[in-house]
Image: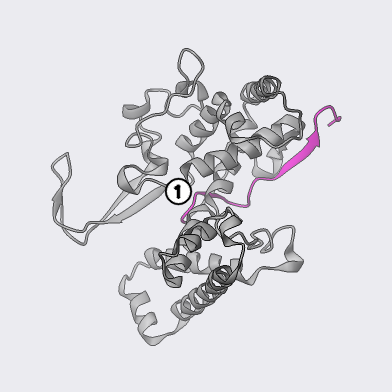
Amino acid sequence: MVAFGHDPRCLADGGVLEEAKSEFMHNFGEALDLVIGRFMDPIEVSWKIKKWLNIGTERRLKKAIADVHAFAMDIVRARRQSASVKDRDDVLSRFVASDEYRDEVLRDIVLSFLVAGRETTSSGLTWFFWLLSSRPDVVARIADEVRAVRKATGTRPGEPFGFDTLREMHYLHAALTESMRLYPPVPTDPQSCAADDTLPDGTFVRAGWFVNYSAYAMGRLAAIWGEDCMEYRPERWLGDDGAFQPASPFRFTVFHAGPRMCLGKEMAYVQMKSIVANVLEELVVDVVKEVAGGGAPEHVFSISLRMKGGLPVKIRRKGECV
């Protein structure tokens, strides 16, 4: 909705709206999975041969991409013809209103937002709620902070949280950041070297080589985070006054750093904080530990750090008996 101003029905494929499957989201997800499959193939030239012959997974990928592009272009063209485009707040309408971009560029901009945000926020929240299941003290502090912010702003439970209200939730911000340090939504990030270069430690990198850094590994290094690096401790992000203290993006690399830092960083925090604050204000989330076997959940290899099988939970309103 934020990117397109159009509901792509992300929950339709395998979710609560199974009866109304979204062909677009199915094709979108398949294209992402097939691209990942290229990197998993031990024979690098294999996918290139299949692409040249237009067979197998490459044939499926070609069709999925074509269908995704067609869907996105239909929305772009419809938005260009809309008389109310200047009054809409979604990303696509803002770009269309500027009248500076070709349809193909607008299509790629919006698809980039979808690639970046399709599973990252949900993945981050899944691991976050799993961590909270063993930390009732953190849950209590978040709930206390939400109540305090409600009182200070004069808003009542159930009312939407504004940007300024969410900005005052420093402990929640720290709790989410600490969760992403241990379980970054995008665990690794491969880059292609454009020209011969030498890394700060003296390692030579030739043009065309892939350089991959792991936010997952960096978030668990004692040299960076101290001997308690494996502990979930939101307080490490708070100053003496209780305010959130950000780390250098070259240290906390979840949103990358430099000129290509994630454009959706603030949007992601707003979405996650709004969801968590609303949930913990009125509900109790109980993780079904017997389903997961009581141990740490398994990972699913993908662009995002997905939890295998998802996170089974039981939801009840506060005050209800278990």
Q: Residue at x 60, y 56 (%)?
A: 87
Quarter holding the N terminus is bottom right
Residue 316 in magenta stretch: yes
Q: Nearer the viewer, residue 286 or 283?
A: 283
Would residue 246 appear left or right of 88 to someone viewing this image? left
Instruction: Specify start and end residues of the magenta stretch as a single range.
Output: 303-322
Q: Quadrant of residue 245?
A: top left
Q: Residue 131: image x %, image y %?
A: 59, 33
Q: Nearer the viewer, residue 265 or 6?
A: 6
Residue 262 in magenta stretch: no
Quarter holding the C terminus is top right
Q: Residue at x 63, y 25 (%)?
A: 142
On screen, 42 above or below 250?
A: below
Q: Nearer the viewer, residue 106 or 190?
A: 106
On screen, 27 above or below 311?
A: below
Would residue 112 appear left or right of 200 to someone viewing this image? right
Q: Nearer the viewer, residue 214 or 69?
A: 69
Its colouring scheme is one colour
Q: Residue 119: image x %, image y %?
A: 55, 53
Question: Which residue does the numbered mark 1 point to in the structure image?
Answer: 186
Amino acid carrying mark 1 in the image: Val
Q: Residue 95: image x %, image y %?
A: 47, 60
